[in-house]
Image (cartoon, helix red, strand yellow):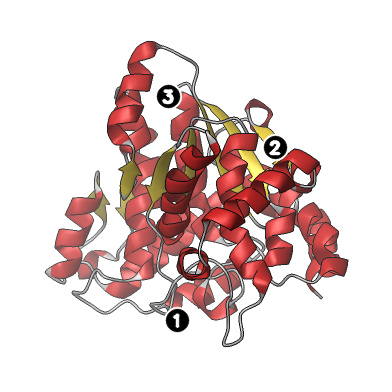
Amino acid sequence: MDKFELVKRNTDEIIGEEELKKLLKTGKKLSVYWGTAPTGRPHVGYFLPALKIADLLKAGFKVKILLADLHAALDNVEWPVLEKRYDYYSKVIPLMIKAMGVNPKNLVFVKGSDFQLKPQYMLDVLRLSSLTSIRDATKAAAEVVKMGKNPKVSGLIYPLMQAADEQYLDVDAQLGGTDQRKIVVLAREKLPKLCYKPRIEILNPLIPGLIGEKMSASDEKTKIDLLDDEKTVRKKINSAVCVSGNPKNGLMSFLKHVIMTIKKDRKEKFIVRRDKKYGGDLMYSDYGEIEKDFVTKKLHPLDLKNTVAKEIIGLLVVIQKNKKKLLELSKKAYE
């Protein structure tokens, strides 16, 4: 697989795709950043950007991970617990990257407040605010920030800071979820007005929650937490929405974008263990085969759930080995 295909796979969209192709042809060492704000506790949906980070490293990118503590404050995390939540994220995110088979030492971790409080950065945020209408800032933030019925000014600052981050992290591209599309489009539009270059925007899909909604770090019912034990993982997956014959659900999405991508890279099969009286084991090499059997009801939802649970438990092994320390940090940050 060539570099462009590595970057593009498992994405919904690349804004600036032709720019990316041209840059890759130059042979220049490109850089990209992925940012996450330490708000609610991370969940298994974070494995999707972790996979993309692995792809970008394989494609020769320098990858920076922004742990955006100030963005968390702008998204209504209380200031007294901000540092504690940063501590939790700074320990658990590298373990997720490690679970993807990537050495966290190959990544550059950056704390947002280390550069976002500097005078020139804040001056540029103010300059961006003078170029952005309230309507455009609200529209950009709506899918990312908890705006509520009576939005705070902080929610409008959030997308302006994310735009400035691209310049101050000195990157060629940003990796984010499709819920951030309006923010990155704002960045591409406004940065040139400050005489900065627009960046390439790589957008990965969002994995639906277990109950058919967006998987959310702040809603336990929609997600599998990274610290959930085996019993809890199985219980949550058994309770997940997974209607026979209908592949539009969180489990199938996670299977498609995360589990089967890992299986393909490792040249492994997805094996559904079944009693011989139910037809025996099923073995799959790609997601399309699984979806076909699920739609035709050859693959029963319970068998699918049991196998997905096993795979997720396997992904969490690295994190579970560090659970005691992570629980201590989590208690300080969230309880």
What crowding class fits label 1: few (fewer than 14 Cα within 10 Å), some (14-19), or many (20 or more)?
few
Number of numbered discs: 3
Of 142 and 236, the residue lying toward us? 142
Mark positioned earlier in the residue sequence (1 or 2)? 2
Q: Is residue 140 placed above or below 112 in the rendered structure?
A: below
- Quadrant placement of the C terminus: bottom right
Residue at the extreme front of the image, as rendered: 130
Dot 1 falls on a residue whose secondary structure is: loop
Dot 3 falls on a residue whose secondary structure is: loop
Q: Amino acid at mark 2?
A: Phe
- Whether residues under marks 1 and 2 lie with C-beta atoms below 8 angstroms apart, the answer is no
Residue under circle 3?
A: 59
Rounded to the nearest whole Å, what is the CA distance between mark 1 and mark 2?
A: 36 Å
Work out whether residue 177 can be spotted: no
Of 115 and 67, the residue lying toward us? 115
Work out whether residue 237 can be spotted: yes
Residue 263 found in image quarter: top left
Residue 34 tag number? none
Q: Amino acid at mark 3?
A: Ala
Q: Which mark is nearer the camera, 3 or 1?
A: 3
Rounded to the nearest whole Å, what is the CA distance between mark 3 and mark 2?
A: 19 Å
Residue 239 tag number? 1
Residue under circle 2?
A: 109
The percent position of residue 143, horizontal first and vertical second, equals 47, 69
Task: Tell me: 209 left or right of 285.
Answer: right
Residue at the extreme bottom of the image, as rendered: 149
Q: Amino acid at mark 1?
A: Ser
